[in-house]
Amino acid sequence: MTSETDPAKQPEALADQTPSATTRDVPAFGWSGYAERVNGRFAMIGFLAVLLVEALSRDTFLHWAGLIP
């Protein structure tokens, strides 16, 4: 086994490949699986927030936000 493929000889390379706490994806910028998963989770939180605003104000979100009269 060479030192290029031996993980024990390259601990700094493994530090960059540490997976997320909740998934096996490695955090990365750009169009990665990790970024898409995080984006989807934030979208679900935003959708839930809109539903809560509508339920608590008893008005549509677009009207509550002032986007329609």
Image (cartoon, grey):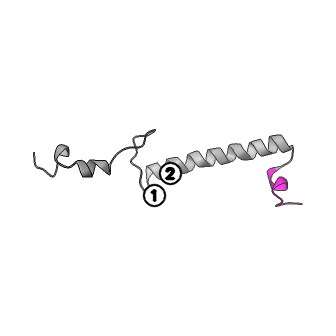
Marker disc for residue 39: none
Local packing at callout 2 (Cα closer than 10 Å; few below 14, some 14-19, many 20+) is: few
Residue 4 position in % (x across, y down):
15, 52
**Image quarter hosting the N terminus:** top left
Q: Which residues are magenta?
A: 61-69
Residue 52 position in % (x across, y down):
76, 42
Local packing at callout 1 (Cα closer than 10 Å; few below 14, some 14-19, many 20+) is: few
Q: Of the residues under marks 2 and 1, which one precedes in the sequence?
A: 1
Q: Which residue is disc 1 drawn over?
A: 31
Task: Find numbered disc 2 in the image and state the secondary structure of the residue it sits on.
Answer: helix
> Which image quadrant for residue 24?
top left
- Which residue is rendered at x = 44% and y = 58% of the image? 29
As measured in the structure, the alpha-carbon distance from the residue carrying label 2 to the one carrying label 1 is: 7 Å
Q: Is residue 42 above or below residue 31?
A: above
Q: Nearer the viewer, residue 53 or 11?
A: 11
Amino acid at dot 1: Trp
Marker disc for residue 36: 2
